[in-house]
Image (spheres, coloured by chain):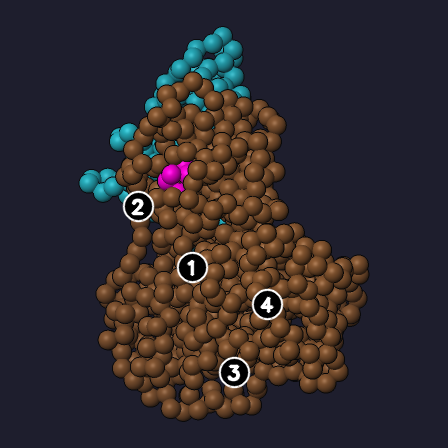
Amino acid sequence: MAAPDLAPQPEAAPPVHTISLYVTNKPGVLVRVALVFARRGYNIESLVVSAAAKGDFSRMTITCSGETTTLEQMIKQLSKLVDVVHATDHTGTEAYETEIALVKVAAPLEARTEILQIAEHFGAKVADYGTDSLILRAFGSSEKLNAFIALLRSQGLLELVRSGKILMARGLDAT
Amino acid sequence: MSAQPPETPCGAEVLIRCLEDQGVEYIFGLSGGAAIPIFDALVESSIQLVLVRHEQGATHMADGYARATGKPGVVLVTSGPGATNTVTGLFTAMMDSAPIVVICGQTLTGNLGKDAFQEADVTGITYPVVKHSTLVRDANDVPRVVRESFHLANTGRPGPVLIDMPKDVSEAPCDAPLDPPIDLPGYSVVGHAKAPDVEAAAALLARSRRPLLYVGQGAVISGAGKVVTELAEKLRAPIVNTLLGKGAADETHPLHLGMLGMHGTAYANKAVVDCDLIFAIGARWDDRITGNVDEFCVNAKKIHLDVDEAEFNKVLRPDVCLHGDARLVLEDLLPKVGPLDTEEWLATCEGWRERYPLKYPKKGGLRPQHVLDRLNALTEGRAIITADVGQHQMWAAQFCRTRNGRNWITSGGAGTMGFGFPAAIGAQFGHREKEVWAVVGDGGFQMTLCELATAAVHKLPVKILVINNNFLGLVRQWQEMFWENRLSGVDLEGNPDFVKLAEAYGIKGLRIRRPGDVDRKIQEAREHDGPVLLVAEVVKEDNVFPMIPAGAPISSMIIEPPKERMEKPSGST
């Protein structure tokens, strides 16, 4: 049974995964992590690094796309890095996830009502009210933000900044 | 130096003190501006500095020392080009899991990132080729960084570790305690494998009738050779080893079939094709071993024992994975297995051994295989042999039957030409009393031959056997076999007279021209109390067989020279 399941399946679009890393807060750790992704041909779609609850440690939440079979091996290669305390693939788990988006849309008077209605529907707040444009701030699941942004595209979307997904395991499970 | 109280040592002095505490005997190094404080601290130290002629040589010496002794080899170089010259050595050590610690001088911390003179972003350049690295920014971190670096280099799966020491850190006072705790929360070392996995391996073995132990360098590193042999004898299973696993279990043992893989013995590879169970012990299913992995041991059960979890399911999916130290895991496994019914299987393997022996033409000039066969016979397989990379390496691997894992040292994963000779120097420093032979080709030797000076200065009794065919022979063989003999970039026209070269360094030079000279010249070299360069002027166009074309299934092994041109192999190199 020699590994037919390791073969890549080119016809399927590479699935998106969410990985959480708990790392020691030392210089170079981000480069070491990024090199593992680059070497195995994984595309990082978003990456959030922030301080962890305990000093001297950081949390990385990475969404990335590539072959699932490569990912299993990559998680082990990430865990092997001396500065990585643990690496977990949260894809398909029930972890709580969220993300923030800032969206700047052109808002001429005649379009403004509809934009505000869309914002209200998605629970987005107006972060900056300008004469010609609005900055809207939305948060929630990445899928919800995708839908929100898709609607605003037809309204003259000027700029988009997303925080990238952050995630936390539920209950007493460690992230 | 700043005006500091004389009783407070500086970072460089503390660094050397910590190296002494680690039991370091030798530092292989080359000085330079940013490293002067460290070289200055060495003046007062018990550690002996081995001044090399090129930093790459220093890394291979440290590597050879490490592989011969099991203790980390230490390198000290300066910043910029001094440090970048270690990259090949780091890569070589990384690929072969060799514990070396490379200490680089660095420009002042205030100059970092400003393209200062001889400033290279060394940690940045070396990330992919080190197990770990640290840029030291505070002299008080020196003791901790040294302890951590040595711990990382030589535990778990060993590997190279780099310490980058800015000059101001070397000069700054350090009053930190010399034995701080190691602070590596992301690093742990595995020992025993999980008991259910050991049971599962024992159960698989119990059902096997054609088992094969496939032994790699992990067995050498963990000192598992004895228990591998015990396991083979208890199971009545044949053994094959990889290029780097050579000698982990004595290759002259009746159950041993020698090296498997691309240029392994025909009988080892036939056993791989026909076994019903293959047990990888500290080996990683490298492409030199598996050939076309989709056709590799398709019907055989696979057990994989490795200290590095990231090796599991990387190349193929074994039936059982044993995550642990090879020696400890095999000691746990041994009482759980019993003799297998392998009489027929062992007879089959013996039949192959008789039918397809390693052989070479006895006529038509001096044959490299003949020289290596005789070297093996005259040294009784007890010398440390370091091989460079190329045809001579494969012939040495075939004909020098290694009896002890640390007696065979070569660059396997990286295939670094220029490795063999400096590695022999390092091995000789590690074992002053032992006979050490560097087996090199004329191509690779010229990449690091400046270290002849190092061997001469230290009057090392190292013997250098140059298998001189005036070609980059392995590539020439490929071009002959697969590229219509269109030779390109392989003719080493302009080679020096190696005997005169040796004499220029004050080293005894000897030459073998005829088959009848071989024994006499080898013995003359052995009897000389000092370095000897022995050049064997061998036939120019000999080829290494058996051979499995890269990327092809093992069953397509070529045992005899083919009569027709072959298709280009699909594998990489």
Q: Position of residue B450 (x, y in %)?
A: 65, 51
Q: Secondary structure at mark 1?
A: helix
Q: Judge whether residue B530 can be spotted in this image.
A: yes
Image vertical order of residue B198 relative to residue A97, above or below: below
> Which disc, if any, is residue B528?
4
Per the model, the C-alpha gap separating discs 2 and 4 is: 70 Å
Residue shown at the point (39%, 43%) measured from the top left = B19
Q: Nearer the viewer, mark 2 or mark 4?
A: 4
Residue hosting label 1: B69
- Asked whether disc 1 touches disc 2, contact meaning CB atoms under 8 Å apart, the reply is no
| Magenta stretch, residue numbers | B15-19
Q: Nearer the viewer, mark 3 or mark 2?
A: 3
Left or right: B73 in relation to B545: left
Q: Position of residue A66 (x, y in %)?
A: 48, 48
- Asked whether disc 3 touches disc 2, contact meaning CB atoms under 8 Å apart, the reply is no
Left or right: B218 in relation to B96: left
In magenta segment, residue B569: no
Per the model, the C-alpha gap separating discs 1 and 2 is: 48 Å
In magenta segment, residue B16: yes
Q: Secondary structure at mark 4?
A: loop
Residue hosting label 2: A93
Q: Name the one closer to the observer, B458 or B546.
A: B458
Residue B438, picture quadrant: bottom right
Subunit of label 2: A
Q: Secondary structure at mark 3?
A: helix
